[in-house]
Image (tube, rainbow, N blue to C red):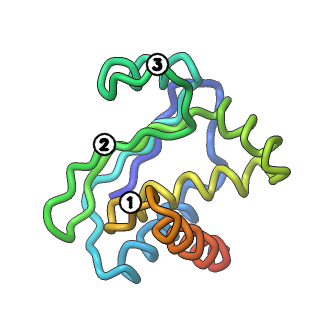
């Protein structure tokens, strides 16, 4: 089950559509949906997590905690709305499109995709583009 939680003044307007899209992605990747929590927050909230749990003293748009059991997807995905807004401007992208990319990026990591090498990042971007294209 996908849950959306808000720690900032932001709310999705289409939770059901996004939850179905996330589930479709998981199934198409040969995995099973478990419990997935999205927590939308601000830079300060996410920065504290980054320092406390990852020992990174930087701002980031997303941090995910993977609790997957085999092919069953479980995890907490924290997304800074402030960072997504700034990244949308930097990448000359629409805010909602950028938000959707970050949302599905975390799921693709849980499904086993990496993005540290150039070839892995290219594959990840291709998967993101594909799943963004089927979002209705």
Give the farthest residue toward the front. Answer: 118
Q: Pick the residue in front: 119 or 83.
A: 119
SS type, badge 2: strand
**Cα–Cα span, label 2 and label 1:** 10 Å
Query: Which residue is under mark 1?
Result: 109
Q: Pick whichever of labels 1 and 3 is earlier in the sequence.
A: 3
**Which class describes the residues within 10 Å of circle 3: few (<14), some (14-19), or many (20+)?**
few
Q: Does residue 11 appear to the left or right of 78 in the view shown?
A: right
124 above or below 99?
below
| Mark 1 closeness class: few <14, some 14–19, many ≥20 residues within 10 Å | some
Residue annotated with mark 3: 57
Q: Could you tell me which residue is drawn at 62 percent across and 38 percent down?
A: 11
Q: Give the label, 2 or 3, closer to the camera.
A: 3
Q: Is residue 10 above or below residue 58?
A: below
Question: How many residues crowd mark 2 within 10 Å: few (<14), some (14–19), many (20+)?
Answer: some
Residue labelled with disc 2: 65
Which of the two labelled residues, at mark 2 and mark 1, occupies the earlier sequence position? 2
- Counting from the top left corner in percent of width and height, residue 20 is at 48, 69
């Amino acid at each position: 089950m996908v849950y959306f939680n808000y720690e900032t003044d932001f709310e999705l307007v289409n939770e059901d559509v996004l939850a179905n899209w996330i589930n479709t992605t998981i199934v198409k990747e040969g995995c099973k949906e478990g419990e997935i929590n999205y927590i939308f927050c601000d830079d300060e909230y996410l920065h504290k997590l980054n320092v406390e749990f990852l020992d990174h003293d930087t701002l980031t748009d997303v941090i995910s905690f993977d609790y997957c059991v085999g092919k069953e997807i479980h995890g907490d995905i924290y997304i800074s709305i402030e960072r997504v807004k700034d990244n949308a401007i930097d990448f000359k992208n629409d805010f909602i499109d950028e938000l959707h990319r970050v949302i599905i990026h975390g799921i693709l990591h849980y499904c086993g995709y990496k993005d540290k090498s150039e070839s892995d990042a290219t594959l990840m971007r291709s998967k993101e583009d594909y799943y963004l294209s089927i979002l209705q």
